[in-house]
Image (cartoon, grey):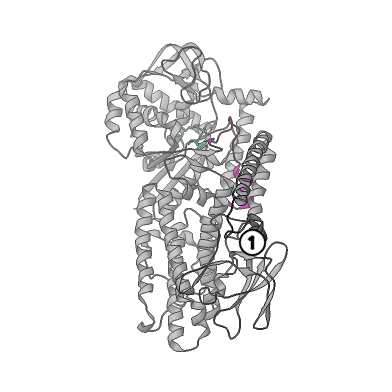
């Protein structure tokens, strides 16, 4: 029988439209679910929307809608978005569904019948935004979580005997895997050690909620209602045998992923409710940090959200998925910026995995008629081939360990180190030069090199599939391996790629993004955020001041320069520009020269560069270089060279091309 795996996201409040902060939690869970499915686990991945409570009731009122209309609309947006993002949830629960409401009432009755609920008068402070009772607060005090002023509540309520669970909870926290990471566990420990007070679990001053069984004047506290989704969705409280069997199979959850601000609800209240109902507690609550934008938690109330759709429209779902998991150290807060997104996309996806796939598969097409080659005799082997095989084996192990410890960023780093190693291997083994030779040794060596590259590509693709499902499915099919979903990841090992595998149609999976991608996304967001626009104008003004100051400082230095140095005016005479290599080929009968066609924005220049011994022409196409654009033209081997490519000259004369870590627009002036 296969192992089961049950994973949940929190359910999202429907008072705010989805943004990439929400997408972050969902993406993290989705990648885990996808990896578990590939590993053969019978996986159930749940997400949904949290639709009751005073906060939603008020938001609907403000929008002139009924709470149900309002919830229908925003819940629909979440569902649509997850679809566009290739989120593979098995169910989507809404707390306004009948199945949920009935089952929550069953849970309530169970807790009540077990003797953990009593009636009393509640007097205290409540934060509507967090739907949180703030212990010890006085009228006018702020909520410790969000800083908003709390409201005074005095009403007859039902109470949950939370105080009875202090010792049991402390015993639960002894299992270090129950709360991750450690910092969150320590917070919870100190909160519980400081003493637990009974918790009000009903409200009677508004109606948007699930009625308390046998006392419909009250609605169930929205957090009890919401937390219960994790069990109601899989059949708890149902009389249907199928639903009961599903609950038995999947509960307790293997991973419940949450943001750090809702740790108390999940690590204190939730296990206490479960214990009170006589149910097992979840195996692990894993808390991630926040996605920050402009240095603050991205949230609707701050108005600093980035809509997911903008990124999907410009770069696609895989780009966002990869970026969030690669860039943010899981558990910590991470900043989002469009520049960083595009930079990561270009360096790791377009130039990294995408480029490795297209160059490897294109060469197999060209030199082996589109069939995966296999080395025909041992003489074609070199230590570098074994080094790649070893690196791939290590990566399979490391990636799995890190990923399963929720260290997504480091796991991806290790897979991309393999991609980089294979790139280097290709450059060093020059399959394009081997391809020009016809002797048997060269053919055999070429076969080994391309087999090795394709096999490493297959392994990186399989590992990355849960994170970038769309592109990896395409690469997998291009290698000729069919449907990646059918691949059993636990069997992944070096050497499984079969000789003679017929490649599919080879097409680029990650087209390079240029600078305009950032501007486009920013513009799309700015039209949604007039306030942000004003803010940006302010920032631009501040930036302009800084540039001006730098210019003054530079010219001051220039006027005091000594005679053996050039003045800034002399330097300004040299027109250095960013160019994009469009065409690169060897110059016939020359070992040193390459003929390049370089796009410098205003025109395409032909440049002859003495870099043929250091760079294969194939490796240069699509690369950005620095060109001296106003050098007088000169003729070399009968061809005109119109500019000069800038390179560092190393000892022994090997040139290394100047390049940029950040993305730069074609034609940009260097000064
Ligand atoms: N409805 C409650 C959860 C109930 S679960 C029984 C809730 N909803 S929420 O919509 O406010 O948040 C849902 C999830 O989105 C949380 O895990 C939260 O941390 C996450 N995020 C919302 N904004 C976020 C960021 N800016 N960054 C990262 N995650 C964020 O809480």
The single residue placed furthest to the front in the displayed view is 563
The single residue placed furthest to the right in the displayed view is 602
Q: Give percent across and percent down for residue 533.
A: 67, 37
Judge whether residue 627 can be spotted in this image: yes
Indicate left or right for 106 with 79 as reference: left
For the point 41% across and 27% down, which residue is it?
107
Check residue 436 for magenta coloring. no
Indicate left or right for 44 with 84 as reference: left
Q: Give percent across and percent down for residue 440.
A: 44, 88
Q: Quadrant of the C terminus?
A: bottom right
Check residue 308 for magenta coloring. yes
Indicate left or right for 332 with 72 as reference: left
Residue identified by numbered label 1: 576
Give the class, few, some or many, for how many residues have Cα within 10 Å of label 1's Cα (few <14, many ≥20). Answer: many
Q: Quadrant of residue 168?
A: top left
For the point 43% across and 67% down, which residue is it?
456
As drawn, 413 above or below 503: above
632, 310: nearer the viewer: 632
468, 206: nearer the viewer: 468
The magenta region covers 294-317
For the point 50% across and 24% down, which residue is it?
131
Q: Give percent across and percent down for residue 597.
A: 66, 71
Indicate left or right for 655 with 532 as reference: left
The single residue placed furthest to the bottom in the displayed view is 439
Judge whether residue 238 can be spotted in this image: no
46, 574: nearer the viewer: 574
């Amino acid at each position: 029988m296969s192992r089961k795996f049950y994973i949940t996201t929190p359910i999202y409040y429907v008072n705010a439209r989805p943004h990439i902060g929400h997408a972050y939690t969902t993406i993290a869970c989705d990648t885990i679910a996808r990896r578990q499915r590939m590993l053969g686990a019978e996986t159930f991945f749940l997400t949904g929307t949290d639709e009751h409570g005073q906060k939603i009731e008020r938001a609907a009122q403000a929008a002139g809608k009924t709470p149900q209309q309002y919830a229908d609309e925003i819940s629909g947006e979440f569902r649509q978005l997850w679809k566009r993002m290739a989120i593979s949830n098995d169910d989507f629960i809404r707390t306004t569904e009948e199945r949920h409401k009935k089952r929550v009432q069953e849970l309530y009755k169970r807790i009540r019948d077990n003797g953990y609920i009593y009636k009393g008068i509640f007097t205290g402070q409540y934060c509507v935004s967090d739907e949180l009772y703030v212990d010890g607060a006085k009228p006018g005090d702020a909520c410790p979580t969000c800083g908003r002023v709390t409201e005074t509540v005095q009403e007859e309520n039902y109470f949950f005997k939370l105080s009875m669970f202090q010792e049991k909870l402390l015993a639960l926290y002894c299992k270090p895997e129950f709360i991750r990471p450690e910092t969150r566990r320590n917070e919870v420990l100190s909160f519980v050690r400081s003493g637990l007070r009974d918790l009000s679990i009903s409200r009677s001053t508004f109606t948007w909620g699930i009625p308390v069984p046998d006392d419909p004047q009250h609605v169930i506290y929205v957090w009890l209602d919401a937390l219960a989704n994790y069990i109601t969705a899989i059949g708890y409280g149902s009389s249907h045998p199928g639903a009961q069997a599903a609950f038995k199979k999947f509960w307790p959850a293997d991973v419940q992923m949450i943001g750090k601000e809702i740790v108390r609800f999940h690590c204190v209240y939730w296990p206490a409710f479960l214990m009170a109902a006589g149910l097992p507690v979840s195996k692990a609550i894993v808390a991630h940090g926040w996605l920050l934008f402009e240095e603050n938690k991205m949230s609707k109330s701050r108005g600093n959200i980035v809509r997911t759709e903008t990124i999907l429209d410009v770069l696609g779902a895989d780009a966002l998925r990869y970026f969030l998991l690669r860039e943010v150290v899981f558990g910590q807060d991470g900043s989002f910026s469009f520049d960083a997104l595009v930079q990561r996309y270009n360096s790791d996806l377009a130039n990294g995995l995408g480029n490795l796939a297209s160059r490897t598969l294109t060469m197999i097409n060209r030199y082996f008629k589109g069939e995966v080659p296999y080395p025909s005799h041992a003489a074609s082997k070199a230590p570098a081939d074994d080094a790649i095989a070893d690196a791939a084996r290590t990566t399979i192990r490391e990636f799995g360990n890190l990923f399963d410890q929720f260290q997504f960023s480091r796991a991806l780093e290790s897979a991309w180190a393999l991609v980089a190693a294979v790139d280097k291997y290709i450059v060093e083994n020059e399959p394009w030069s081997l391809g020009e030779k016809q002797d048997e040794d060269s053919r055999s060596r070429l076969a080994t090199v391309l087999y090795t590259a394709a096999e490493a590509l297959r392994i990186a693709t399989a590992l990355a599939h849960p994170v970038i499902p769309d592109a990896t499915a395409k690469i997998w099919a291009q290698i000729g391996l069919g449907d990646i979903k059918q691949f059993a990841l636990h069997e992944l090992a070096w050497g499984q790629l079969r000789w003679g595998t017929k490649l599919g149609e080879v097409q680029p999976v990650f087209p390079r993004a240029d600078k305009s991608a950032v501007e486009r996304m920013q513009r799309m967001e700015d039209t949604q955020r007039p306030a942000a626009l004003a803010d940006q104008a302010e920032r631009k003004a501040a930036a302009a001041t800084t540039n001006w100051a730098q210019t003054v400082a530079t010219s001051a230095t220039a006027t005091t320069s000594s005679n053996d140095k050039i003045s800034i005016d002399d330097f300004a005479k040299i027109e250095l520009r960013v160019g994009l290599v469009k065409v690169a080929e060897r110059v016939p009968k020359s070992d040193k020269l390459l003929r390049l066609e370089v796009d410098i924005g205003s025109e395409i220049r032909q440049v002859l560069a003495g870099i043929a011994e250091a760079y294969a022409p194939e490796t240069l196409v699509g690369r950005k270089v620095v060109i001296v654009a106003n050098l007088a033209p000169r003729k070399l081997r009968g061809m005109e060279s119109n500019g000069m490519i800038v390179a560092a000259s190393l000892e022994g004369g090997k040139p290394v091309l100047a390049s940029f870590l950040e993305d730069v627009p074609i034609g940009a002036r260097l000064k």
